[in-house]
Amino acid sequence: MQDDLIKNLCVSNKRAVARSISIVESNNNESAVLLKKIFPKIGNAHRIGITGPPGAGKSTITNHLTKYYRKQNKKVGIIAVDPTSPFTGGALLGDRIRMSEIGQDEGVFIRSMATRGSLGGLSNRTVDAADVLDAAGYDYIIMETVGVGQSELDIARSADTTIVVLVPESGDSVQAMKAGLMEIADFFAMNKSDRPGSQQAIASIQTILMMREHDEKSWMYKIIKTIATENKGIDNLAEEIERHTEYLKMNNLLLKRREEKTKSRIKDIVENILKTELWSESGKNSLTSSLEKVELGKISPYNIAEEIIKNFKNHKLKQNSH
Amino acid sequence: MQDDLIKNLCVSNKRAVARSISIVESNNNESAVLLKKIFPKIGNAHRIGITGPPGAGKSTITNHLTKYYRKQNKKVGIIAVDPTSPFTGGALLGDRIRMSEIGQDEGVFIRSMATRGSLGGLSNRTVDAADVLDAAGYDYIIMETVGVGQSELDIARSADTTIVVLVPESGDSVQAMKAGLMEIADFFAMNKSDRPGSQQAIASIQTILMMREHDEKSWMYKIIKTIATENKGIDNLAEEIERHTEYLKMNNLLLKRREEKTKSRIKDIVENILKTELWSESGKNSLTSSLEKVELGKISPYNIAEEIIKNFKNHKLKQNSH
């Protein structure tokens, strides 16, 4: 069954792509089987993370960047993980119409991922979905996430090139997440750069960048000015993505960075498999029965946790010896 | 050793409190021992979560609420998990001075928790720290967190009473996190309520509240107007906390809700213990050796994850049979 699906997937059949991502989102056994099978086909796409505060214009940039790549006859896959994105709802009607336009294009695939109800696992599902798009032959995969919260940052971090989109007036709201956003950026887009305060905002980012210790000293961080609504600066943005890609390749960093990311991804997968086993029927029953003791308010959660782990190990011990 | 510490802790000795929280933050074996020992002493404090977007005035509210309780001769413990909070840095100098003033008070204990570097574990550490303050006899424990990100929401959710602080102009930025914030609120504070748009912002929250399905239909959600910088509305806020506490007690919900929270806390503790075991020396070696295969780019992360789990279980099997 899956073999047919994979065959269709690898010729960018949109229905097969959609179906495969749905399988991956379900995160069950079928998902792991599919991901193992498509693994030899991945590694060709360049993955771009676009993140920043709500309202910075990430979707508009994604929209125009996609059109730019389409003119070069490149195929683009988009994964939107953003409660304010036109893909996932919450945006202006105009945005939504523009987006559905590029979605009609045979060479563009758009998928939105829900942020709710997938606690902790969201970044894994998104990377899995990017693997599907990669195997399907999309040349660029754009992952758009709002830069708040750990899992959103994890997604942006999983990209080869990560762009942080800021706006002149976002100074304050960015405060809170500054540390996280500054660290994951390969470069910045100062969007709405025709607005007052733009030069000052750029200067303050430059100050922060100068104070920051650089791991990769040879990389020169740039701040690209854009006015996304007028399609201004998008070509500069695309050139900077190109420059970053070349930089990664020249310094042998593309594979090295992907390996680092694979390492932490494996860690996540391992932890998720164990969690699932832990809270399967036997684990749940142990929790329920242990909790009756907590209701008495006499035993510390730490004692109860230790008991659950003891039960889990004994259970696994029995399973393994059969 | 710990017994002396606990004795001093239980008479609200600030040094013992500080030392105990440091132990708890380290999250090692000593931490679990301490938390087990103080467990019988906890459950008397009322825990208040204060959350909302950056710049909404959470710290100023915390500051004045603390003074209000001090006038009633109640002791207050404050845990600030907020990158924009004066406790953790990033705030105006004036805020910082005000805060250090209440910190001088013998009946007030302030502790800031770092949001960085404690991925996933932050909410556990915060609840542990709240347990320490509870055992130390603080009557009110205020947990102040910025309402972005999963672990910050988890912290606010761990409180008995959760207040979401909004400002008239936060409408847009709140969009992104609306779902999460609306669900955890027991009531709202509309701060800076003298600013234009205040009435409209209140009306829109009321609309959202009406659309929301209520689990606890008998609880009437209120929106309290405050101007924290002028100490206005703080008494109404304190009265609403009191009304909510009474509501919880009258409906037998205080214990019930605490039990629910303990349940998910036990789950977290169990998962963290297993994770620690997993990535201990033997786990790490298995990951490193397995990763040499990934570098070849021929084996899927899912295959490697399964191998690591197999190794982990075999290892545990051997340990358990000795």
Image (cartoon, coloured by chain):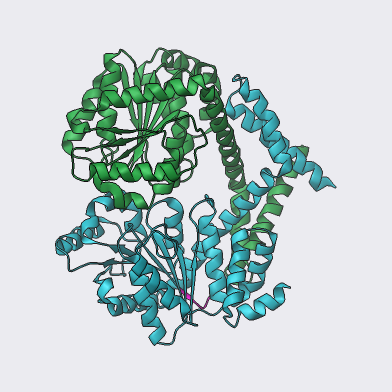
Chain colours: A green, B cyan
Give coordinates of residue A24: x percent, y percent: 46, 30
Give coordinates of residue A53: x percent, y percent: 32, 44
Residue name at image x 60 percent, y 65 percent: B22
Give coordinates of residue B254: x percent, y percent: 45, 72
Task: Please identify the dominant SS of the magenta region.
Answer: loop
Give coordinates of residue A200: x percent, y percent: 26, 45
Left or right of B299 on screen, residue B106: left
Residue name at image x 25 percent, y 59 percent: B209
> Does the rendering let one see residue B235?
yes
Please tell me which residue lies in front, A65 or B175.
Answer: A65
Please tell me which residue lies in front, A134 or A113.
Answer: A134
Magenta stretch bounds: B42-46
Q: Quadrant of the C terminus of chain A?
A: top right
Residue name at image x 58 percent, y 58 percent: B266
Q: Residue furthest right?
A: B322
Q: Does the magenta stretch include residue B95?
A: no
**Residue B115 higher or lower than A160, as above or below:** below
Q: Is residue B43 magenta?
A: yes
> Does the rendering let one see residue A147?
no
